[in-house]
Amino acid sequence: SDVKKFFPLLLPYISVVLIEATGKILGMFDPDVSLYAQERLSSNGVTIMTHAMVTEVTNEVVKFKEQKPLEYGILVWAGGISARPITRKLASAIGGPQIPSDPKRPIRGITVDNKFRVLGVNDVYALGDCALCGCPPTAQAAYQQGKFLGRMLRDGSDQVNEHKPFKFKNVSRCVTTIKNRG
């Protein structure tokens, strides 16, 4: 919209392409939020490429695993989430189930079960961004994980096995607000 307003003569020369390796954008969010974002971007002229695994970027071309290369003029890269160095060191020190089966894949976090027990050691728990538990890496998820773990430990460590597994509940108030604003 800013280009249209301030530089209308450049508009025919500009395109925006959002590239996503997975099947949808904003995959860690509620499906309604992801769909809304995709529809909104598309309606504003953004081309969205999903299932597009980038393999190489040169000065002029983005190359993909299965799609044809894409020429570009300006590239903004915001790819991937990486584990903090301390998280990688802890996972490496634990070893075993913490090490990816494919040696080419980096350690992305500390693998836990559905009660946040770290796999490969006893009486150690991890939650939040460092824990690989299937939850989105958001404050909402970490808050729920903290409450769950606190209550579970309050009930006694001898009761952990009997405790119900953690279940993330996405609070979708923002989805209702987004839908109402249209």
Image (tube, helix red, strand yellow):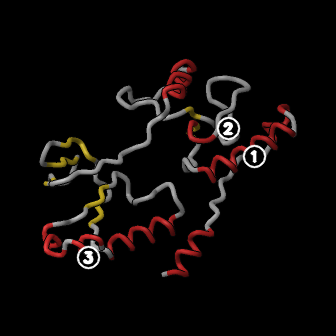
Relative to residue 114, is residue 102 depicted above or below? above
Residue 24 in the image, given as x and y percentages of width and height: 40, 60
Residue 129 in the image, given as x and y percentages of width and height: 56, 41
What numbered label is drawn on residue 5? 3
What numbered label is drawn on residue 148? 1
Query: In the image, 156: left or right of 130?
Result: right
SS label for mark 3: helix
Residue 46 in the image, given as x and y percentages of width and height: 28, 68
Amino acid type of the residue tagged 2 in the rendering: Phe
Determine the CA span between mark 2 and mark 1. Answer: 9 Å
Amino acid type of the residue tagged 1 in the rendering: Phe
Looking at the image, do the residues carrying marks 3 and 1 touch, with CB atoms under 8 Å apart? no
What numbered label is drawn on residue 116? 2
Foreground residue, 65 or 108?
A: 108
Relative to residue 176, is residue 85 depicted above or below? above
Residue 172 in the image, given as x and y percentages of width and height: 61, 67
Label 3 or label 1, whichever comes before in sequence order? 3
Choose mark 3 or mark 1, whichever is in front.
3
Residue at 18% across / 75% down in the picture? 8
| Dot 2 crowding, Cα within 10 Å, few <14, some 14–19, many 20+ | many
SS label for mark 2: loop
Amino acid type of the residue tagged 3 in the rendering: Lys
